[in-house]
Image: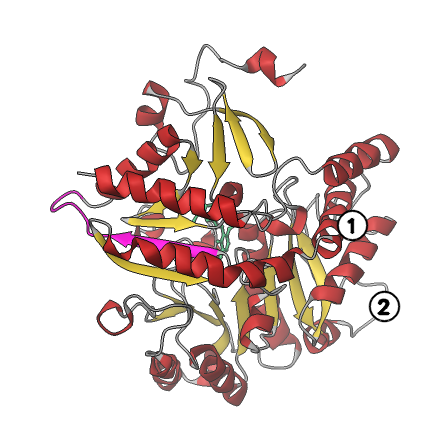
Amino acid sequence: MSHRAVRAPNDLRAFWMPFTANRQFKQAPRMFVAADGMHYTTSDGRKVLDGTAGLWCCNAGHCRPRISQAIAEQAAEMDYAPAFQMGHPKAFELANRLMGIAPEGMEHAFFTNSGSESVETALKIAIAYQRAIGQGARTRLIGRERGYHGVNFGGISVGGIVSNRKFFGTLLTGVDHMPHTHLPGRNAWSKGQPEHGAELADELERIVTLHDASTIAAVIVEPVAGSTGVLIPPKGYLERLREICTRHGILLIFDEVITGFGRTGAAFAAEKYGVLPDMITCAKGLTNGVIPMGAVLTTGAIHDAFMTGPEHLIELFHGYTYSGNPIAAAAGLATLEVYAEEGLFERAAKLAPVWEAALHSLRDCPHVIDIRNEGLIGAVELEPIAGEPTKRAFQAFLAAYDAGFLIRTTGDIIAMSPPLIISEAQIDELVGGLRKVLQKLA
Ligand code: PXG
């Protein structure tokens, strides 16, 4: 069946849409029916320039034949193999290839099906690792205000976005939060990493003093906070977090679900910033967003701590029916090949200054109170309409969609993260389009 056959579903009630204003959407649906390269096609036949790589995931652009073919071939050859106590070659090959681009020191990959599952997996491994090395009292998990670590209970517990937490009860116990790093008074209009705020990492020392290091298993942060509206780490901040964690025997987890796979101009933000965590969570760009898949990368030390005891026993009681799924693994392999052959991470690094200059040219637009960027990530923060937070940015989103380009908004912040194949002309088109939208906003 071609996509044309479902161009206009006649009843939108049954599908309860995720993170969506369902009633507003269903009154005026926005439907994509096809995609190619940098563009989506809408159900009414319009082309929309993708300024967000889907949801920060289609880093190589859309419908890349190499990836689609790998999926089709794998589906025909072997659709599924049991994930527990059985293997298939492509999952091993993908883990090996991942180690080829992961920061030096990462040695193993545990596969999941999403960023949220990668986070749960990393948090569980952290606590179990501490127990395995005789530090069983280390069960606390430290996150950060404004952090986004997916939507499962561990992730929202360490996360710091109030609407993602407040409806869902008491969450995990034994969790604490560091302050976020957004200092608009001192850092507004920073290009790349802001100058001020490295000392915010010292708040971890305060938390250690409160709970004692012997009770803390791990700290989890996004190197660049994405979902909350793009907060770039202040210079020296991540280095200081690393130093404090190491000194206290606390594992450092980088949640690279957004920053992984070239988004910052390096394979991972850990490489970009020269800070090695103990675990990296990733997903999204791992398969170019085409098939759900995530992974937790760990150091050899973490993995090896589990490899004790009788060899016929399971070492880690964790995993998913679809961990390392053959079709996802095939998609992942093809995706990594496309990234490597087209030099897309290097391309992102090369385009970053062009992106930065274009984005910051919006500084004089109405309502704009800050602009932030790193790699091919950008955010334009708007002054909220008094008494109606989020409305102005959402209006910008709708106007942009009507004008033929896709952006994301969170609160009153516009976030953009185009596929890494974007051309300089398309950067101008996107930013020029946004300029027109901002100029017309109420
Ligand atoms: N960690 C981070 C840092 C993320 O950004 C997740 C975990 C969860 O991934 P899954 O695959 O379970 O959704 C994410 C997801 C947005 C946006 O527009 C961001 C995400 C997802 C959807 C939209 O900011 N991040």
**Label 2 belongs to which residue?**
311
Q: Quadrant of the N terminus?
A: top right
Residue under the point 67% across and 47% down:
287
Residue under the point 47% across and 23% down:
46
Which of the 4 image quadrants contains residue 299?
A: bottom right
Q: CA distance from mark 1 to mark 2?
A: 15 Å
Q: Nearer the viewer, residue 142 or 75?
A: 75
Which of the 4 image quadrants contains residue 201?
A: bottom left
Please say whether residue 386 is one of the residues in the magenta stretch.
Answer: yes
Q: Nearer the viewer, residue 411 or 418?
A: 418
| Residue 196 as seen in the image, left or right of residue 103 | left
Where is residue 229 shown, x and y percent of the image?
Answer: 36, 55
Where is residue 194 shown, x and y percent of the image?
Answer: 36, 73
Q: Is residue 228 visible?
A: no
Label 2 sits on what residue type?
Glu
Instruction: Write the start and end of the magenta stretch as one range.
Output: 377-388
Question: What is the secondary structure assignment of the residue under circle 1?
Answer: loop
Label 1 sits on what residue type?
Phe
Which of the 4 image quadrants contains residue 212?
A: bottom left
Q: Residues within 10 Å of mark 2 (few under 14, many from 20)?
A: few
Q: Quadrant of the C terminus?
A: top left
Q: Is mark 1 within 8 Å of ligand 1?
A: no
Q: Nearer the viewer, residue 170 or 411?
A: 411
Depicted 198 relative to depicted 128: above or below: below
Q: Is residue 412 visible?
A: yes
Q: Residues within 10 Å of mark 1 (few under 14, many from 20)?
A: few
- Residue 84's label in the rendered image is 1
Depicted 135 relative to depicted 333: above or below: below
Where is residue 298 shown, x and y percent of the image?
Answer: 67, 69
Question: What is the secondary structure assignment of the residue under circle 2?
Answer: loop
